[in-house]
Amino acid sequence: MHNLNPAIHFNKVNFHADDKHILKNITGSFYEGTITSLVGPSGAGKSTLLKLCNGLLSATSGEIHIKDKKIDTYEPVELRRIVGIALQNAPMVNGTVFHNLELPLKLQAKKLEVKTAKDLLDDVGLDEEYLHRDVRDLSGGQRQKVSIARTLVNQPKILLLDEITSALDRVSKHEIEDLIVKINKKYKVTMLWITHNLQQAIDIGHYVWVLMEGEVIETGKSTILKSPTHERVKQFVKGEME
Amino acid sequence: MSTLALAIALIFVLIPIFLSKTFNLGLEKDTTIAVVRSIIQLFAVGYILKFVFDTESLIYIFLMVFVMIVAATQNARKKGKTIKGITWKIALTLVFMEVLTQSILLGFNITPATAQYIIPISGMVVGNSMVLAILFLNRFTSEVDTHQEQTELILSLGGTPKQAIHTQLITAIKASMIPTIESQKTIGLVQLPGMMSGQIIAGASPVQAVQFQLLVLFLLLTTAAVTSIMLGFLCYPTLFNQRMQFLKIR
């Protein structure tokens, strides 16, 4: 059971960009130690919502609290180390897997121990032989695993995963799903993840937020996707499940 | 050179116009405009320089350098329109280059403090600085656009804006400096610089012409390095806001 303390709380949050109203009056919480799936059609504002959580973007109006503190009271660098994000295409810096794992510490003028790097690879299900492999030689699934391991280097309390399974094959998707559950249990980290696969959302997420056209249409335990109440969500679920 | 000789030299203008027409290159109009403009501009500047050299007035020297900097800024800013405040950033860089180089030249008595020296050297410094600024801005804006994900990645891992843009900045600085360094490696072997050739043709001693040319080359090396680096460090912060957010992220 989870203790239901909010790790992130949104209060009437709006986000505009180039005269477009991307997020509209978002209110709600993501709870400590839980996995929440963000689902909804493309362009619903899901990625924007994640980027608001770790300060890559700022809300136009409204308040966001991270662990009871207003988000803008954190130094941006400190916030991004507490709230880690694995980006959609798993961008890598040139070099080996080790170079990429070392990056978060290198930015703080620190070094990563080889043993720690091997442990991280083990956590994400990659053999230690990958440590010195060029990132250009990795498959999509392996890149995503390295991307998640790299985010874990900062020991974040909250982990945001931006459509990390969208470009993967079925086997890699299952591996990443298992990995999400494993990381959540091992590190007790609060996780928000975006997926287009509603079955994934039901299987992995404790909670779900359904976003459409910048609004949160439905929230609750992930099983609500099996019997949504809102008409637009019913239509969406029907479309996605078919 | 007589006016008649110069008129005959217009053959060198007729050749590209003829070729453009023959091969349908469509460059006749541009070539004609370029030639007419260069004739008017060069004669005008020739008479202005004669006047300024004769009067030896500091005000006119300042005025000429000012006009050079304004014209160079106007030309270079087109390449960096997407960067906030690019006009004053280029102007500041050009002014700094001019002050730096003239301070060294005049301060150490390397060149005399006369219009004959200050104006042509200023022209070379500001002109070269302008080309460097254009090369830098062209490459920098393209690097920033191409590597947006990389920038976002480093910010997301807790990096600072400077760390997030470092690779793109260094690539653009190096790329803009390479033509200056490479052309200096082959100077004298492949090409004789215009200023040196002009002095030799005008009857100056080749050794003295070489000495001045070397001075110009050293100046251009400094110009290349300082312009690119200074402009780079003035430009990159405008890509981020106070919350260390990359302004291109959507």
Image (cartoon, coloured by chain):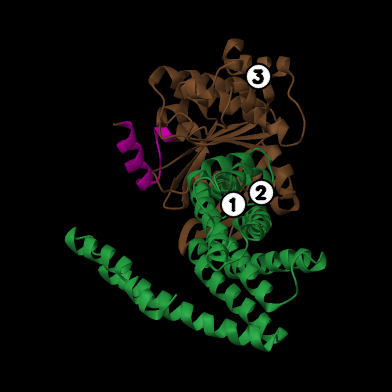
Chain colours: A brown, B green
Q: Which residues are magenta?
A: A225-241
Task: Judge the density around disc 2: few (<14), some (14-19), many (≥20) Cα neighbours within 10 Å.
Answer: many
Residue A14 in sight in this render: no
Task: Judge the density around disc 1: few (<14), some (14-19), many (≥20) Cα neighbours within 10 Å.
Answer: many
Chain identifier of the residue bearing label 1 in the image: B
Cβ–Cβ below 8 Å for labels 1 and 2?
Answer: yes
Between label 2 and label 3, give the one nearer the viewer: 2
Q: Are marks 2 and 3 on the same chain?
A: no
Image: A92 above or below A97: below
Q: Which residue is mark 1?
A: B246
**x then y, percent, for residue A226:** 40, 32
Quarter of the image for residue A234 reads top left
Task: Judge the density around disc 3: few (<14), some (14-19), many (≥20) Cα neighbours within 10 Å.
Answer: many
**In the image shown, does A65 or A55 lie closer to the viewer?**
A55
Looking at the rendered structure, the kind of residue marked 1 is: Phe
**Residue A120, numbered label:** 3
Q: Alpha carbon of mark 1 to alpha carbon of mark 2: how far?
A: 8 Å
Predominant SS of the magenta segment: helix
Cβ–Cβ below 8 Å for labels 2 and 3?
Answer: no
Instruction: Inspect the magenta stretch and tell me whether residue A236 lies in it.
Output: yes
Residue at image point 64% right, 69% down: B122
Count of numbered badges drawn on the protein:
3
